[in-house]
Each structure stands twice: as structure tokens, then as C-alpha cells.
Amino acid sequence: MEPAERNKERIKELTADFWNTANMAAFDKYYADEFVVHMADGDKSRDDYKALCQAYFAAFPDLQITADGYLAEGDKVTKIWTAHCTHQGEFLGIPASGNAMEVRGIEVFRLSQGKIAELWVSMDVLGMMQQMGAIPQTA
């Protein structure tokens, strides 16, 4: 199997084994020690990202991510995704709304030695906040 295909399979495994099962015990299996995530509000460390994942799993215990597509080249894999979940716990200071949600996003992963070393994330945060009731819906 080509390295790009192997990396794509690794990201598919991450989605199934980590995200769709809220399996925090698997975090170290997928994320390298030197991991960094690049987000709209700045870069985050491995520990910051791990805490964010825990917050997602606590607030959205039924979180399920569906991959809408993958692109793999060299050491990078792009995943286009849709998340479905229910806002059942506090998230970033926003109390549980009980609202069912659908959020879309795209991620680019850089893998090194089978682990994720870097991640670039873009997701519909405005839509997420509106669905949680933190920001009014636009007409």
C-alpha cells in the first residue's frame, strides 16, 4: 500500500476508533507527542487539543462524524466531514440546549511515522453556535 493510502486509512481509523466512540484512551495512539493544531483562533498544543476533545465528548456524547470525502497525497490527508450530535452538556460556557445539531468541516492532517503531527481545522463554528442557541439564527 502506498504511503498516502496508508495515511488515509489511518485517518479513517481515527474517525471510527476515537471520534465516533469518544475513546479518549486512544488519543495517544493517533496524536504524536509534538502534535499541533492550527485553528482560526490560533495554534493549540497537544494538551490543549486533548482537553478540547474531552470537552466535545462531554457536551456531545452521541457525536458521530461521517466522512464526506478524503484526499491523500504524500504525508497529508484531507477529510471533509459532517458531524451529527445533540448538545447534552455545557460546552465552552454554553449550557446544554438539548438541540440536535449538524456541523460541517474540513481537516488537513500531516502524518509522521503513523501519527498525526499537525492538523489544520476549518468548521462551521457560527452554525454550531446558532444550533446551540448561543447566537441567534439569521433569517
Image (cartoon, grey):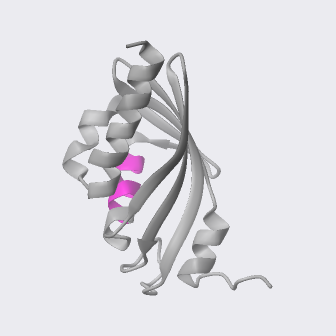
| Residue 100 screen position, x and y as percent | 47, 79
Rendering coords of residue 5 (x, y %): 44, 21
Residue 63 image offset from top left, x and y in percent = 38, 65
Taking the view exactly as shown, the residue that stands out farthest to the top is 2
Query: Between 10 and 88, which is closer to the camera in this rendering?
Result: 10
Please indicate whether residue 20 sits to the left or right of residue 71 in the image. Answer: left
* Residue for point 59% across, 74% down: 129
Q: Residue at x 48, y 61 (%)?
A: 83
- In this rendering, the count of numbered labels is 0
The quadrant where residue 113 appears: top left
Give the residues drawn in magenta, as a range: 47-55
The relative height of residue 27 versus residue 52 in the rendered view (above or below) is: above
Determine whether, in the image, residue 88 is placed left or right of residue 129: left
Residue at the image point whose x is 58% and y is 85% from the top: 133
Q: Is residue 54 magenta?
A: yes
- Is residue 3 placed above or below 136 in the rendered structure? above
Vertical relation: 124 (above or below) 35: below
Q: Residue furthest left?
A: 25
Image quarter where the C terminus lies is bottom right
Residue 128 vs residue 32: left or right? right
Instruction: Characterize the magenta stretch by its predominant secondary structure.
Output: helix
**Residue 94 located left or right of residue 51:** right
- Is residue 97 shown above or below 109? below
Q: Position of residue 17 (x, y in %)?
A: 27, 46
